Amino acid sequence: MKWTEVEEIAIQLADAHPEVDPLKVNFVDLMRWVIALPEFDDDPKHCGERILEAIQQAWIDEAA
């Protein structure tokens, strides 16, 4: 899974952290959690604020 697979990342984060409100996750933790996902296989250096914002928004949508 790559950084660009925002929807899939959001689904896996929602499954891995069901007790977490995605609105309250800071980007440092969000990035660590994405990198820790078992299927994630991308360079952490390719991540930026826009990607994290998109992941967070997709996770919010997934949790709704």
Image (cartoon, grey):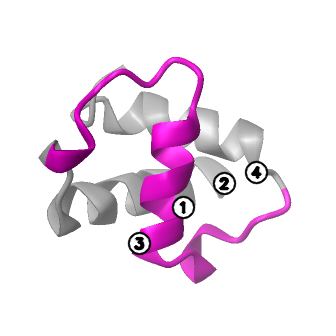
Assess disc 3: are there few (<14), some (14-19) or many (≥20) residues with their C-alpha within 10 Å of its C-alpha. some
**Quadrant placement of the C terminus:** bottom right
The amino acid type of the residue labelled 3 equals Phe
**Label located before the other in sequence (4 or 1):** 4
Q: What whole-number distance in Å separates the C-alpha atoms at marks 1 and 2?
A: 5 Å
Q: Secondary structure at mark 4?
A: loop
When the figure is inspected, residue 8 is found, relative to residue 51, above or below; the finding is above
**Which of the two discs, 2 and 4, sits closer to the camera?**
4
**Is residue 11 rendered magenta in the image?**
no
**Label located before the other in sequence (2 or 4):** 4
The amino acid type of the residue labelled 2 equals Ala
**Image point 67% across, 45% down: which residue?**
14
The amino acid type of the residue labelled 4 equals His
Read off the residue under disc 1.
Answer: 60
When the figure is inspected, residue 39 is found, relative to residue 22, above or below; the finding is above
When the figure is inspected, residue 8 is found, relative to residue 57, above or below; the finding is above
Assess disc 1: are there few (<14), some (14-19) or many (≥20) residues with their C-alpha within 10 Å of its C-alpha. some
**Which of the two discs, 2 and 3, sits closer to the camera?**
3
Read off the residue under disc 4.
Answer: 17
- Circles 1 and 2: CB distance less than 8 Å? yes
For the record, the magenta segment spans 19-45
**Label located before the other in sequence (2 or 3):** 3
Residue 13 at x, y percent in the picture:
61, 43
- Circles 2 and 4: CB distance less than 8 Å? no
**Image point 17% across, 48% down: which residue?**
45
Read off the residue under disc 2.
Answer: 63
